[in-house]
Amino acid sequence: MTWLALALVVTSALVHASWNFLLKRSGGGTGLIAAASLLSLALYAPVVAFSAWQSGWTPQPIHFGLMFGSGLVHTAYFLLLDRAYRSGGDLSIVYPLARATGPLLTIAFAIAFLGERPGPWALGGAALIGVSAILLAGNPFAWRSHHAKEAVGFALLTGLMIAAYTLLDKRAVAAFLIPPLVFDWGTNAFRCSVLVPFARHRAPGGMEEAWRTRKRTVIAIALLSPLSYILVLTAMVFTPVSLVAPARELSILFAALMGAHFLKEGDATRRSIAAVGMVLGIAGLAAG
C-alpha cells in the first residue's frame, strides 16, 4: 500500500469514527438517518457535477445498476448499524465488531474471487488488526443481557453488509472507472429512494423531528458520512481492496477513544493493548 493510499484511508477512518460517535450520542433513529442522507444529496450535488464534468464521465446503464445495487446494500448497512446502537450496544463494542467482521470477510472474498494476492506482511497486518479488534470488544458472546446479544447480532450483520458493499464498490470505481464522487452520490440517491419512504412509513414525522431537534447532528452526518467513503473509494481506484479494507479498521481505535473519553465506556488498559496491535497491523499493511 502506498503512503498516499494509507493517508486517504487513515483520514477516512477518523471521519468515519466521528460520524458514528455522533450517531450513537444523538440516539440515532431511521428519521435522522434518512434526513442526513437526503441533505447530503443537496450538499454534495455541486461538487459531484463538477467532478463528473472534469473527469469526462460518460454514464452507462451498468453504472446505474452498480449504484442501485450498492445503494440497497448501504441502506441495509445504515439500518442495521443504527439498530445495533439503539439495541443498547456501546460504541466501543458495536463499532469494533462491525468493522472487524467486514474487512476480514472482504479479504477472504478478494483472495478467493478477485484473484488478489496480498503479501505475507500485509496478511499478517490484516490478521493482527482483526485480532486487536476482537480484543478491543472483549468477549461479547459471554454477555447474558438479551439486549447486548441483540446488539452483537446486528453488529455482525452490519459487518456482512460492509464486506458486500466494499467488494461491489471496488469493482465500480476500479473496473468500470466511475468517479468516486459520482459513484457515492449516485449510491446515496438510490439509497434515499428506498430509505426516505421507509422512514416515513415506519416513523411518520421522524425526519422533521430529527431536523427540528438535532439539526447540527443531521448536518454533520450529511457531510462526514459521504466524505469518509469518498476517501476510501479514491484509495481503492489504485490500491487492492484486500489492503484498503483492513486499513479502514484504524477507525476502531478512534471510536474506542471517543467512547472512552466522551461516553465514559472505560477499560483503558485493554483498549491501549488493542491500539498497539492496530498500529503494528497498519505498519504491516504499509509494508505489504
Image: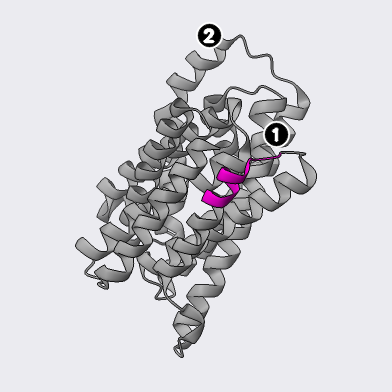
Across and down, in percent, residue 160 comes to 63, 59
| Highlighted range, magenta | 117-125
Circle 1 is placed at which residue position?
171
Identified by mark 2, the residue type is Gln
Q: Quadrant of the C terminus?
A: top right
Q: Is residue 228 magenta?
A: no
Q: Is residue 260 left or right of residue 208?
A: left
| Total numbered circles | 2
* Residue 198 seen: yes
Q: Who's the residue at 28% across and 63% down the image?
A: 259
Kindly give the residue lying farthest to the front in the view shown: 120
Q: Who's the residue at 46% across and 90% down the image?
A: 144
Q: Is residue 109 left or right of residue 217?
A: right
Q: In this rendering, is residue 239 above or below 279?
A: above
Across and down, in percent, residue 149 comes to 50, 81
Between marks 2 and 1, how big is the CA–CA gap? 21 Å
Across and down, in percent, residue 277 comes to 41, 57
For the residue pair 64 and 14, the one nearer the viewer reads as: 14
Across and down, in percent, residue 285 comes to 51, 41
Circle 2 is placed at which residue position?
54
For the residue pair 60 and 204, the one nearer the viewer reads as: 60
Q: In this rendering, is residue 265 above or below 53?
A: below
Q: Main secondary structure of the magenta part?
A: helix
Identified by mark 1, the residue type is Arg
Q: Who's the residue at 68% across and 31% down the image?
A: 172
